[in-house]
Image: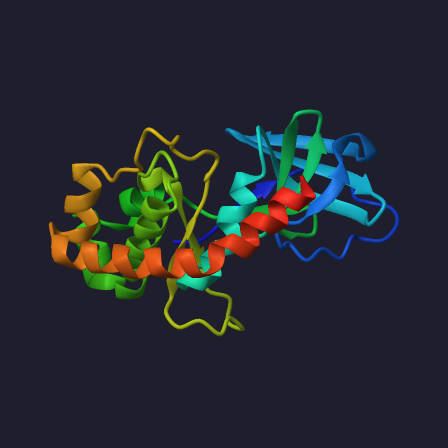
Amino acid sequence: MADKIYSSSFPGQSGKNAELKWDGSCLGRWSEAKVTHQVKSGQKLYVQLQLGLGNIIAMVKYIRNPYPCLIDELKPYFGLVKQGTHWLKRGKTVVILIKIKYRGMDIIENISLITFINNSCDDKAQTIIRKYPELLQSIRQIFVFRLITGVKNNNNGSIIINFHDPTDSRNGRCYGVSVDELSCVDSAGTAELSSNIFNEWFNNDFPHLTKEVRLHTWILLTIAGALIARLVLAF
């Protein structure tokens, strides 16, 4: 199993490449960016653009607020790998830039958990549990993280699989990355895990899930205030 190489047909860039921190910060206004090329791969939109900082190639999403950037910046505090984001103001909405991997002008797309399961497992989740214990742990952590941060749409399509680079300091062969945290539940609702997800990945172990939720909630309360304040001030 490997990452998918997608030929982007980006024509290349003149000038310097932007050196970005991918720390969820605002880069200015979308009107200041010049899109020189864009391509679609399924539901994903990739752009090549120019800002004052230099040239950028990234995945983009047009949404209402920079909430996904906040969620992405919280991930390392919970032992998860973040995607890396920035955002730009676009009227009353925002454009999220998401860091991607590319080789030359070819985009390297991580496969989804759904594809990973279907292509590599005869008995689906049980094979992952048996063969990839480090992946199972990150999948569980991701679902707990999404639950306590109020992210909507928690399913196997919410996770992509990242295969380790030989220089990666993390242990194991592969790990999950949470994606598409585009919206959260409103004040009247609660984030949920379906019974299928609970059965598939937690094996109906409610005490374990409860323990993880309590720990993650304590971490969230400890560090969320500073990050929220930073985004509010930027907006």
Residue 27 to residue 183: above or below: below
Q: Residue furthest right?
A: 15
Q: Quadrant of the N terminus?
A: bottom left
Q: Is residue 203 left or right of residue 12?
A: left
Q: Quadrant of the C terminus?
A: top right
The residue depicted at 23 percent of the width and 50 percent of the height is 121
Residue 24's x, y, as percent? 61, 50
The reply to whether residue 11 is in sight is no
Q: Residue furthest top?
A: 91
Q: Is residue 94 left or right of residue 10?
A: left
Asked where in the image residue 59 lies, by quadrant, the reply is top right
Residue 89's x, y, as percent? 70, 34
Asked where in the image residue 13 lies, by quadrant, the reply is top right
The residue depicted at 71 percent of the width and 25 percent of the height is 91
The reply to whether residue 178 is in sight is yes
* Foreground pick, 131 / 50: 50
Residue 69's x, y, as percent? 56, 45
Residue 110's x, y, as percent? 47, 48
The residue depicted at 19 percent of the width and 55 percent of the height is 210
* Foreground pick, 16 / 19: 19
Residue 40 to residue 171: above or below: above
Q: Is residue 105 left or right of residue 85?
A: right
* Foreground pick, 66 / 124: 66
